[in-house]
């Protein structure tokens, strides 16, 4: 097991290096560079000399391999450099947003789990009845509705029925929990519903599968209370694949909420990414991509390990 | 949607009560409709959407691009069934023409993404060894960020516009198709007929295209239909961010962007109807895709 963990951790390095190379090259292919964009806002004529000076300041005049190695050397020391646009340290810029994004992702996950596990189990227990059909339609609808549209509808509903709008600015939860939650609960609901759809479907099929197992039949045959059969025998075993789905979706939520953040005017990682890419902020975009990729790969790895820990039958070589 | 009972009678056996002369595809369709009413209703909505897109010129009551500054923010009713937007454009006509954009982007993006992915997957499985390892690591890299982030990066490079959005979406879907198709192709590589083809001295290209690809049709079709809904949703999201289809092309996501949120209180119909159109389309594609997956291969339901 220890050997497996070590191998998996080591294998992350080439993948992340690949991600770094890919995004480094991609950013250089994007037409227009940050210096031109910065001065485009000035409006006046800017001489080539000024542009070159600015580029030299940002280190853009160096050969590409030097820029790349410089960046990588920084990453290894966990120094991501400064944003080319704002000049502030990238770690600082990301930290502010990450707080919001992680909280939102956690809340959305909570919403999804609270919806998915009871609904999915219910649908499985009442397979092929109207309850099952209702749950399935509810979950497919969740997949079909764009979360940004759901977000618009939520805002609209709050406005029309309560004449109230969620606060516009982010307050950290330890400063004012009420203010914080009254802003973030709505996007969490919009995203959580969509996210619950996948988990509900997975719960349903996993429970259905487990209910057909011999040990469930044995539990029933020995006259065990049906409620205990479901919770102790069926649910416990059905939760494994559900866990995978939830883990993967969580990884996606960090950075993948670009559109929802736009609707609710939240200054999270997704918004930062869109801004950075629009400004051709190379260092910022590169760091963000590397971060989302790292979270994605790491959560994947973590879920696999958790899987083996929860299910003693799984042994990685 | 997961049907766990095995359904071996998926496509074969002719439906009872049909005359002998009925063509096979019709029999199969009717059989599918009877076994999978939900999937069939999804298929019907897709057909309807296709018709609307084809006949947009006849169906749309107004020019989707025409501004009528005397009729801005008209509520639904009268000459404008679903109201007008901030530029006095007819919402219904824009939704009707928007179905063209959605279907065009949806079909071409998922088709090219799934096809290129399938070819890469099969080739990777066929050659195996180092080639397989390198290709799979490259796919890992492409799959290590959320789809929308990858699509955004591609759009940033290529710029906005319908063709670029199609490219962005297919690039994001390609590695997922490659991964799934490869795992099926690995089993096919070991079959006697592939061995026989190799023994006959056929070139890899011939074996891959003529012998292996036709046999991964089930996972390919499943991925393709699963992509359709996602592609439409992704196009809507990109357009909503202003990084998809360019104004003034009628596109559902774009309609939600242009002020729909700001004017939501004054003109809720602007936000309501395009979103309904997106949801209905994706809903139909998902229903259809799910049932097709159940019919073709019940084992793949967790995809």
Image (cartoon, coloured by chain):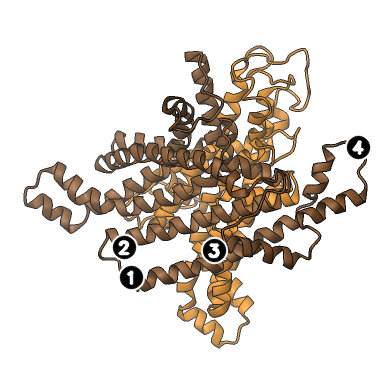
Chain colours: A brown, B orange
Q: Residues within 10 Å of mark 4 (few under 14, many from 20)?
A: few
Quadrant housing the C terminus of chain B: bottom left
Q: Earlier in the sequence, mark 1 or mark 2?
A: 1
Task: Evaluate whether residue A31 shows in this view.
Answer: yes
User: Mark 2 and mark 1 in contact (Cβ < 8 Å)?
Assistant: yes
Q: Is residue B242 left or right of residue A123?
A: right
Please tell me whether mark 2 sits on a helix, a strand or a loop. helix
Q: Residues within 10 Å of mark 3 (few under 14, many from 20)?
A: some
Q: Reply above or below: B250 against B184.
A: above
**Which chain hosts label 4?**
A
Q: Reply above or below: A246 against A315.
A: above
Q: Reply above or below: B198 against B220.
A: below
The quarter holding residue B281 reads top right
Look at mark 1 in the image and give the residue it sits on: A1
**Which chain hosts label 2?**
A
Q: Reply above or below: B213 against B2.
A: below
Residue A315: image tag: none
Answer yes or no: are tags 1 and 2 on the same subunit: yes
**Which chain hosts label 1?**
A
**Which chain hosts label 3?**
B
User: Residue visible at 66% across and 58% down?
Assistant: A23
């Amino acid at each position: 097991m220890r050997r497996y963990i070590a191998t998996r951790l080591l294998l992350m390095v080439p993948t992340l290096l690949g991600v770094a190379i890919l995004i480094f090259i991609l950013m250089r292919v994007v037409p227009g560079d940050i210096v031109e964009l910065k001065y485009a806002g000035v409006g006046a004529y800017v001489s080539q000399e000024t542009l070159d000076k600015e580029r030299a300041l940002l280190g853009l005049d160096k050969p590409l391999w030097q820029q790349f190695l410089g960046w990588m050397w920084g990453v290894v020391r966990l120094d991501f450099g400064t944003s080319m646009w704002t000049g502030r340290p990238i770690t600082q810029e990301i930290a502010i947003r990450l707080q919001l994004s992680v909280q939102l992702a956690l809340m959305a996950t909570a919403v999804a789990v609270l919806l998915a596990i009871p609904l999915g189990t219910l649908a499985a227990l009442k397979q092929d009845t109207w309850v099952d059909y209702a749950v399935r339609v509810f979950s497919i609808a969740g997949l079909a509705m764009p979360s940004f549209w759901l977000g618009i509808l939520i805002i609209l509903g709050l406005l029309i029925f309560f004449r109230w709008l969620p606060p516009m600015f982010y307050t950290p939860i330890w400063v004012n929990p009420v203010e914080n939650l009254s802003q973030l609960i709505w996007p969490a609901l919009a995203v959580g519903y969509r996210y619950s759809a996948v988990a509900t479907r997975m719960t349903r099929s996993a429970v259905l599968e487990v209910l057909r197992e011999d040990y469930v039949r044995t539990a029933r045959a020995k006259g065990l209370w049906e409620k205990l059969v479901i919770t102790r025998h069926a649910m416990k075993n059905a939760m494994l694949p559900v866990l995978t789905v939830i883990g993967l979706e969580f990884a996606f939520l960090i950075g993948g909420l670009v559109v929802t953040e736009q609707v609710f005017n939240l200054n999270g990682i997704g918004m930062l990414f869109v801004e950075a890419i629009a400004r051709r902020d190379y260092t910022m975009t590169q760091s963000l991509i590397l971060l989302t990729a790292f979270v994605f790969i790491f959560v994947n790895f973590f879920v696999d390990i958790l899987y083996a820990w929860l299910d003693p039958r799984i042994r990685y070589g | 949607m997961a049907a766990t009972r095995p359904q071996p009678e998926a496509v074969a056996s002719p439906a009872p009560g049909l005359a002998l002369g009925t063509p096979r595809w019709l029999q199969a369709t009717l059989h599918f409709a009877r076994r999978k009413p939900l999937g069939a209703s999804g298929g019907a909505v897709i057909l309807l959407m296709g018709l609307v897109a084809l006949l947009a010129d006849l169906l749309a009551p107004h020019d989707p691009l025409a501004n009528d500054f005397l009729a801005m923010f008209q509520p639904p009713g009268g000459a404008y069934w679903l109201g007008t937007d901030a530029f006095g454009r007819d919402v219904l006509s824009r939704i009707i023409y928007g179905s063209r954009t959605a279907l065009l982007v949806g079909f071409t993006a998922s088709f090219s993404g799934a096809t290129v992915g399938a070819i890469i997957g099969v080739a990777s499985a066929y050659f195996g060894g180092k080639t397989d390892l390198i290709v799979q690591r490259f796919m890992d890299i492409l799959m290590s960020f959320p789809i929308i982030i990858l699509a955004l990066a591609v759009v940033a490079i290529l710029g906005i516009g319908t063709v670029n959005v199609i490219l962005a979406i297919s690039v994001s879907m390609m590695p997922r198709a490659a991964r799934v198709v490869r795992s099926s192709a690995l089993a096919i590589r070991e079959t006697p007929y592939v061995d026989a083809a190799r023994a006959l001295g056929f070139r890899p290209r011939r074996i891959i295209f003529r012998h292996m690809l036709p046999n991964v049709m089930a996972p390919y079709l499943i991925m393709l239909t699963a992509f359709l809904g996602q592609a439409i949703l992704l196009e809507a999201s990109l357009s909503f961010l202003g990084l998809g289809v360019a104004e003034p092309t009628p596109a559902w996501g774009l309609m939600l962007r242009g002020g729909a949120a700001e004017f939501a209180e004054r003109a809720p119909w602007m936000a309501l109807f395009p979103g309904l159109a997106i949801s209905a389309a994706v809903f139909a594609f998902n229903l259809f895709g799910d049932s097709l997956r159940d019919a073709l291969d019940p084992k793949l339901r967790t995809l």
